[in-house]
Image (cartoon, coloured by chain):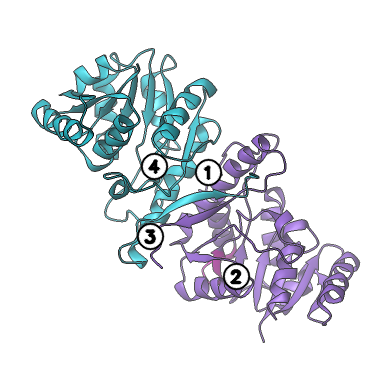
Chain colours: A cyan, B purple
Amino acid sequence: MQTISIIGGTGSLGSGLAWRFAQAGNKVIIGSRDAERAAETATDINRKLGKDLAQGMDNDAAAAAGDIIVLTIKFNHQKSTLAQLHDAVQGKIVVDTTVPLVPPKVARVQLPPEGSAGLITQQLLGENVQVVSAFQNIAADSLPGDAPITCDVLVTGDSKDAREAVIQIARASGMRAWHAGPLANSVAAEAMTSLLIHLNKQFPGAHTGIKITGIPD
Amino acid sequence: MQTISIIGGTGSLGSGLAWRFAQAGNKVIIGSRDAERAAETATDINRKLGKDLAQGMDNDAAAAAGDIIVLTIKFNHQKSTLAQLHDAVQGKIVVDTTVPLVPPKVARVQLPPEGSAGLITQQLLGENVQVVSAFQNIAADSLPGDAPITCDVLVTGDSKDAREAVIQIARASGMRAWHAGPLANSVAAEAMTSLLIHLNKQFPGAHTGIKITGIPD
């Protein structure tokens, strides 16, 4: 059974993904700067699940223990976290969910000079890591509970096999997920999040997402 | 009645939008480098419509005659066309539909150093022109005929009133259209087109698009 480690796993996106991945039968490790909080989040998931599939650790231990490492951290912590985890994730699949939001104007697209957060991750971790970019558009609020997820997942990355592994995890977790091309295409999903934030501000209570249309049945 | 001029209006996106805009009751001018081809496209629209709402002109005359100017030209013709039309469009709303595709890798996002095609248009036309970016994600093949359009339109621009004018035209033409923020956000819609091209290649016969989900009824 594959083990998925979520770095920053006590946050709303991280804990929400961990819950959905565990529901799909994956072993998940909650990573956090605070191992105690990580353990609490894991206990909470196991209680809701009625099974012991989640475990809490500090980020370093989580990165070392996982087969697939999912980064759910804020953009302003991205580079320091990658430097810290660099050695532990070599040879693994790293899933980057980072959206390059620059407060206070988070509803305005402000891409980094490197192109995208996904490209930064690949650059900093090096070519021995298969970076896959995904899950930027899903509203974290839609992940707890069991409601169907109406937002599609655009999966980009330069390794088709690594993309496929992430697509399989997403689909098993009740999401519609697509091969969306090379890691350079992560720009589109990352930029889209600011548009969704803009829409959420217009419609109180909205948790907007996107769906791909026009695929023949 | 407002007059909408389509620059590059004999192409598949331009003629398709002209047809839908005329169906909604707008007067449309087909602009082309070749006035004769423009007239043929206009005649074709009028015949299908059973009404004389379309007219053909060369691009210069079309830009001068329209209230709202829609650019449906290829990225590699963008700068030369903007230089040519610069004076004629001052004080008007210019709708940029340009997608910065760089052949042969059109399924790979390759944004221009300026950020987006929409931002290039604003830069080159100057602040006396209200640039609105829209219609990048609609498959041109879905526009002829009367079939419902399943792809949403993300409308960005720094003037809310200008965005609203374009949203009203799109909605009257049977499309779901959204205020998607400042012109900087055009990056998201432009980049998304390469992902949709990537998806179209995976699913023979697909004309993919996107739909915003999660807006409360």
Q: How far apart are marks 4 and 1 (CA)?
A: 24 Å
Amino acid of disc 3:
His
Q: How far apart are marks 3 and 4 (CA)?
A: 15 Å
Up the image or down, A74 lies above or below B211; here it is above
Residue projecting furthest to the bottom: B1
* B156 sits left or right of B145 in the view: left
Kindly identify which residue carries mark 2. B170
Amino acid of disc 1:
Pro
Kindly identify which residue carries mark 1. B113
Where, by quadrant of the figure, is residue A124 drawn? top left
Q: Determine if residue A143 is in view.
A: yes
Residue at horizontal 24 percent and vertical 28 percent from the top: A80
Q: How far apart are marks 2 and 1 (CA)?
A: 29 Å
Q: Position of residue A66 (x, y in %)?
A: 29, 18
Which residue range is magenta in the image? B125-132
Kindly identify which residue carries mark 3. A198
Where, by quadrant of the figure, is residue B146 drawn? bottom right
Residue at horizontal 45 percent and vertical 38 percent from the top: A115
Q: Distance between the residues labelled 4 and 2?
A: 28 Å
- Label 2 packing within 10 angstroms: few (<14), some (14-19), many (20+): many
Amino acid of disc 4:
Gln
* A45 sits left or right of B99 in the view: left
Between disc 3 and disc 1, the foreground one is: 3
Kindly identify which residue carries mark 4. A136
Q: Position of residue A59 (x, y in %)?
A: 20, 24
Residue at horizontal 41 percent and vertical 68 percent from the top: B217
Image quadrant where one finds the N terminus of chain A: top left
* Same subunit: marks 4 and 1: no
Magenta residue check for B130: yes
